[in-house]
């Protein structure tokens, strides 16, 4: 069965160098995003997969999976992923790392 993935304009390069974070206190939040040079229309789930891949790089397996879980949970609270998107997000993460 073919997966149905939503599409939108996505950033394509969400990483720590392209985000401004309010690092005061315990509640850290992304307050700005920069570098829109790679934006294009694609599958919406790819944007969060790309972000997760960047944050997993250089971490131990346990820390990388913990980061993935935290980012996915936070994203899903604001913009819930569909079942089809959840089915492919891991492959999308791994594809970006390659």
Image: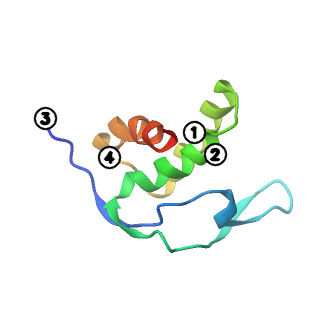
Are the residues flagged by discs 4 and 3 in contact, CB closer than 8 Å? Answer: no
| Disc sitting over residue 82 in the figure | 4
The reply to whether discs 2 and 4 touch (Cβ–Cβ < 8 Å) is no
Q: Is residue 88 left or right of residue 14?
A: left
Residue that appears at 43% across and 70% down: 39
> Whole-Å distance between the Cαs marked 1 and 2?
8 Å
Give the residue displayed 52% in from the left and 40% down from the top: 97
Question: Spatial distance from mark 2 to mark 4, Cα to Cα?
Answer: 22 Å
Are the residues tagged 1 and 3 within 8 Å (C-beta)?
A: no
Picture layout, residue 47 above or below residue 64: below
Q: Residue at x 44, y 57 (%)?
A: 79
Q: Which sits in the foreground, 45 or 28?
A: 45
User: Which of pointers 3 and 2 lies earlier in the amino acid sequence?
Assistant: 3
Residue 55 numbered mark, or none: 2
Q: Which residue is mark 1?
A: 68
Q: Secondary structure at mark 4?
A: loop
Between disc 3 and disc 2, the foreground one is 2
Residue bearing the label numbered 3: 1
What secondary structure is found at the residue carrying circle 1? helix
Marks 3/2 in contact by CB < 8 Å: the verdict is: no
The alpha-carbon separation of the residues under discs 1 and 3 comes to 27 Å
* Circle nearer the N terminus (1, 2): 2
Q: Tell which circle, 2 or 4, labels the residue nearer the N-terminal end.
A: 2
The structure residue drawn at horizontal position 70% and vertical position 34%, both measured from the top left corner, is 59
**Which disc is residue 3 wearing?**
none
Residue ranking furthest to the left: 1
Which of label 2 and label 4 is nearer to you? 2
């Amino acid at each position: 069965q073919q997966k149905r993935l939503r599409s939108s304009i996505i950033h394509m390069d969400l990483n720590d160098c392209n985000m401004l974070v309010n690092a005061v206190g315990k509640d850290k939040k992304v307050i700005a995003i920069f570098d829109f040079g790679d934006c294009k229309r694609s599958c919406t789930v790819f944007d969060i997969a790309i972000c997760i891949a960047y944050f997993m790089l250089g971490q131990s397996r346990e820390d990388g999976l913990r980061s993935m879980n935290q980012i996915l949970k936070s994203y899903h609270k604001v913009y819930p992923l569909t079942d089809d998107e959840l089915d492919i997000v891991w492959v999308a993460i791994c594809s970006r790392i390659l």
